[in-house]
Amino acid sequence: MIKLLVKFFDLGALIAFGAMMACVSLEVVTRNLLKLPTPWAEEASRFFCVWTVFLGSASAWFRNSHIVINVIPRRLSGGPKFVLQAISGILTAIFLLCVWFGTLSIMIIQYTAKTTALEISISYFYLGLMVGATGMVIFHFRTLWKMLFRRDLSSQSLDQP
């Protein structure tokens, strides 16, 4: 199930990136060669950029490939390292849940607001953040659960890439 979810985020980020590049390319060609501005292409490229970033972030979270500063955890071992990782993991989980619930409330508040050119709800932009944050929450809690209850620090530590 997790592998399928990761493939969803990988493929979704790739498709969104391709769509973003297509919109930007179309805008450049139509604006500079044909002298016809396409305002919808700029909005669409922003939309796809948001989706690319947050789907890709969830994918990177699964692979534990986000940038980390691990100066202190590298110098610790045993119990102190575990405590630091547990506190860091729990605080990260709280942050991710705040992002998730905050995004949900913004989506509800902004549902009636429409974009200028595409005339779609602003909530669709936030939906990319919601989907990406959902993936990050799932992947983080999976890793946190393994770390806290299986004590497998060598393969699933939260601070090692």
Image: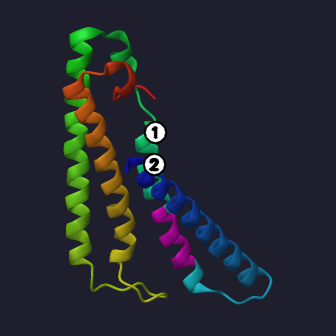
Q: How far across and how far down the image is residue 41, in percent? A: 59, 80
- CB under 8 Å between discs 1 and 2: yes
Horizontal side of 104 relative to 3 (left or right) equals: left
Q: Can you name the residue that lies furthest to the right here?
A: 33
Query: Is 147 placed above or below 17 here?
Result: above
In the rendered image, is residue 81 in sight? yes
Residue indicated by mark 2: 59
Q: Which residue is mark 1?
A: 63
In the rendered structure, the answer to whether residue 130 lies left or right of residue 63 reads left
Name the residue rendered at 51%, 54% in the picture.
10
Give, as a three-letter code, the residue at label 2. Ser
Q: Main secondary structure of the magenta part?
A: helix
Between 118 and 55, the one nearer to me in the picture: 55
Q: Is residue 41 above or below residue 51?
A: below
Q: Residue furthest front?
A: 1
The image quarter in which residue 113 lies: bottom left
Q: Which residues are magenta?
A: 42-51
Which labelled disc corresponds to residue 95? none
105 or 138, which is in the foreground?
Answer: 138
Position in image of residue 130 (x %, y %) = 32, 63
Vertical comparison of 21 with 139: above or below:
below
Q: Quadrant of residue 89?
A: top left
